[in-house]
């Protein structure tokens, strides 16, 4: 959905038009799932987080004032929901719950990664973020949207108001620079 059509649907949805809101969800739903998957690593959690985002957007849509593009606002809301989900998941503790009738034990949460795995993942992520932080501004924005947020190139180009070929060129150079930096620091071995 192009930005002009999206703006019309947003305005109508703000006035209570459910079909317009449904059209927005249909047009941008896959993008939210992809972003959530980058955070959660599983599709079930991604669907849950996307659902939370849409519910939150529906409730607060009338307060959207249009100072920023709707896609950017939606992504910001969604990113916060993803981070909240990760915080909740991190706080949950795996505790067995006995079902005396069945003689079974259920688990309340996925097992947490070992401290070593958690440390290594954080170390790699920190190295990627540090390398990305040294990129020129345009490359950094493209890299963040496409590789860190998982937004498809076409959507990222719209968000950044950039031709898709230009975006892909910047992404290519950004990835090369980040990989070179990671090799130099010993995070990845080629």
Image (cartoon, rainbow, N blue to C red):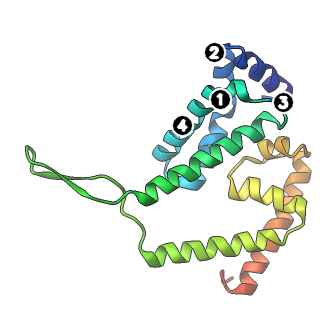
Q: CA distance from mark 2 to mark 4?
A: 17 Å
Q: Marks 3 and 4, Cα distance to the nearest angstrom?
A: 24 Å
Number of other residues with Cα within 10 Å of mark 2, as a class: few under 14, some 14 to 19, many 20 or more: some
* Tag shown at residue 60: 1
**N-term-proximal mark, 1 vs 3:** 3
How far apart marks 1 and 4 lie (CA) works out to 12 Å
Residue at the spot of label 3: 3
Estimate how packed mark 1 is, as few (under 14), some (14 to 19) or many (20 or more) residues with alpha carbons within 10 Å: few
| Quarter the N terminus occupies | top right
The mark lying in front, picked from 2 and 1, is 1
Asked if disc 1 and disc 3 are in contact, CB closer than 8 Å, the reply is no
Where residue 103 appears, as percent x and y from the top left, is 9, 51
Crowding at dot 4, Cα within 10 Å, few <14 / some 14-19 / many 20+, comes out as: some
Residue at the front extreme, as displayed:
63
Evaluate whether residue 41 shows in this view: no
Which mark lies nearer to you, 3 or 4?
A: 4
> Comparing marks 1 and 4, which lies closer to the viewer?
1
């Amino acid at each position: 959905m192009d930005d002009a059509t999206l703006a019309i649907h947003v305005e109508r949805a703000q006035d209570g038009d459910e079909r317009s809101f449904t059209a927005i969800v249909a047009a941008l739903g896959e993008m939210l799932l992809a972003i959530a998957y980058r955070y959660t690593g599983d599709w079930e959690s991604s669907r849950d987080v996307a659902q939370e985002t849409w519910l939150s957007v529906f409730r607060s849509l009338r307060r959207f004032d249009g100072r920023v593009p709707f896609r950017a606002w939606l992504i910001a809301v969604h990113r916060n929901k993803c981070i909240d989900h990760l915080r909740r998941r991190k706080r949950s503790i795996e505790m067995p719950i006995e079902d005396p009738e069945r003689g079974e034990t259920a688990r309340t949460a996925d097992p947490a990664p070992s401290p070593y795995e958690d440390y290594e993942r954080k170390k790699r992520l920190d190295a990627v973020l540090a390398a990305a932080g040294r990129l020129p501004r345009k490359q950094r924005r493209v890299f963040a949207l496409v590789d860190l947020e998982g937004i498809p190139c076409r959507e990222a180009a719209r968000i950044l108001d950039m031709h898709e070929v230009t975006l892909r060129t910047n992404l290519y150079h950004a990835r090369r620079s980040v990989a070179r930096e990671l090799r130099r620091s010993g995070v990845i071995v080629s």
